[in-house]
Amino acid sequence: MSYATYSQRARALFIDSIWWTVIVLFIPLGPSTDDILANPEAFTSTIVFWLLVGQCIPILITGVMWATWGTSPGKRAVRIRIVDADSGRSMTVKQAALRTVGYLLTFGTLGAGFLWIIFNQKRQALHDRMANTVVIDERLMQHHSTSAV
């Protein structure tokens, strides 16, 4: 298998973060500014709670995309895809769910879970290891399959 590079995965994450930001900024996920100002003693807890929710919702939506399509908009744009590490076939719904939980942990460690990509032969991040998945470069896979014919 031709594994996606750290750079490809970073570009895909950047693209995904754009639509995550749109969700967090433009879809009202919490109390209005007026509500927060009316209850200043709850300001800190309200902000922390909605920051957590604002981060979790996009990750959960991403998990649904993984389960449905095996990719996300960012990965699709960069032409990389998530597959089972052993068979190279599409990941299962269970793997997508495990990967989503792992993604929450990866982000919960301030992205440290992504560093595993550098030291892992299959370029797996923490969430890939948890779900037994790998991210492959579709362009190289298509090139190999056409050159083998």
Image (spheres, helix red, strand yellow):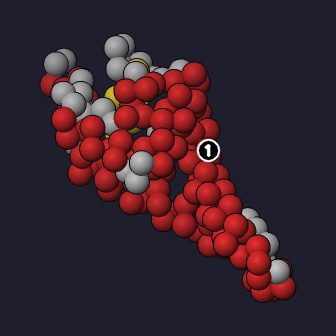
Classify residue 141 by image quadrant: top left
**Residue type at numbered disc 1:** Leu
User: Looking at the image, which residue is at 42% across and 59% down?
Assistant: 15
Q: Which quadrant, please, contains the N terminus?
A: top left
Residue that extends furthest to the top in the rendered view of this protein: 87
Classify residue 115 by image quadrant: top left
Check the image and report above or below for 29 versus 89.
below
Residue that label 1 marks: 60
Check the image and report above or below for 23 versus 1.
below
Q: Is residue 118 visible?
A: yes
Left of 134 or right of it: where is 4? Answer: left
x then y, percent, for residue 124: 30, 32
User: Looking at the image, which residue is at 23% across and 51% down?
Assistant: 7
Q: Is residue 23 visible?
A: no
Crowdedness near tag 1: few (<14), some (14–19) or many (≥20) residues, C-alpha within 10 Å = some
x then y, percent, for residue 87: 36, 13
x then y, percent, for residue 93: 58, 24
Check the image and report above or below for 40 versus 30.
below
> Looking at this view, is 137 or 22 the one in front?
22
SS at circle 1: helix
> Looking at this view, is 109 or 8 the one in front?
109
x then y, percent, for residue 119: 18, 35
Q: Which quadrant, please, contains the C terminus?
A: top left
Left of 5 or right of it: where is 128? Answer: right
Classify residue 52 by image quadrant: bottom right
Residue that extends furthest to the left in the rendered view of this protein: 147
User: Looking at the image, which residue is at 62% across and 72% down?
Assistant: 25
Left of 89 or right of it: where is 32? Answer: right
